Image: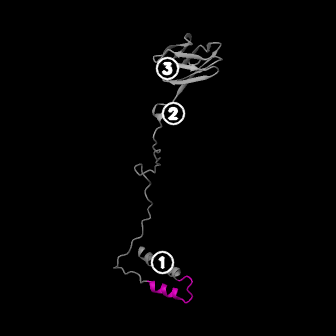
Amino acid sequence: MRARQLPLAAIAAAALAAGAAGCGDDDGAATTAAAEQTQAPPSATEPTASAPDATPPAPPTATDAVPTTTVPNPPSTTPTRAEEQGGGGEEAVRVPATFVIRSGRLTPPTISVPPRLAIELTLRGDDAAHVLVLRAPQPRTLRVAAGGQASLRMPGLRAGSYDITLDGRPAGELIAGGEVGP
């Protein structure tokens, strides 16, 4: 049965080729080309091409490759100085501790900060000049003019209580650890 199908397929292919080659040809050359391309059917002694199998392909198995999505690595960047020091953004992490002088006294008299975080100590003055000293392992001094303000940034402190003097007299304390705030 396959032997009969092959000559028919060859004739159909030749006719198709002749039709494509003869498009727009008015002098009949297409018909001549089709007749020249027609071949005699193969004899029984000539090998014949086999028709493709009609069996469907096997379904994929678990070992077949599964398409995956690859996410590229983010571009590498050089950390900023603040990031290298453990802070984020443009400035290193710090905790504000602001004392205000009213009538020669500190308000609030006590401020608590977390231990080991940098502290920005600020003093706002009243109508007179004052000197504040924080008695820490490395004593810190702030001088403020009348009606002025002074600030300094210092490294974090170990947990504990640190006395503050204002103009040489005890005036308050800075507590590292405990509940944060005034």
For marks 1 and 3, the one nearer the N-term is 1
Residue 29: in magenta span? yes
For marks 2 and 1, the one nearer the N-term is 1
In the picture, residue 78 is in which quadrant? top left
Q: Secondary structure at mark 1?
A: helix
* Magenta segment: 22-38
The label number, if any, that marks residue 37 in the structure image: none
For marks 2 and 3, the one nearer the N-term is 2
The label number, if any, that marks residue 13 in the structure image: 1
The answer, for residue 85, to whether it is visible in the render is: yes
In the picture, residue 53 is in which quadrant? bottom left
Q: Position of residue 182 (x, y in %)?
A: 60, 17
Q: Nearer the viewer, residue 44 or 104?
A: 104
Q: Which residue is mark 2?
A: 88
* Position of residue 106 in the picture relative to residue 71 (left or right): right
Q: Residue at x 43, y 53 (%)?
A: 60
Three-letter amino acid code at the position of disc 3: Pro
Q: Which residue is mark 3?
A: 115
**Could you give the CA–CA distance between mark 2 and mark 3, rounded to whole angstroms?**
18 Å
* Position of residue 176 in the picture relative to residue 1 (left or right): right
The answer, for residue 178, to whether it is visible in the render is: no
Q: Quadrant of the N terminus?
A: bottom left
Q: Position of residue 71 (x, y in %)?
A: 47, 47
Q: Nearer the viewer, residue 27 or 170?
A: 170
Q: Residue furthest bottom?
A: 27
In the depicted structure, whether residue 77 falls above or below residue 145: below
Q: Secondary structure at mark 2?
A: loop
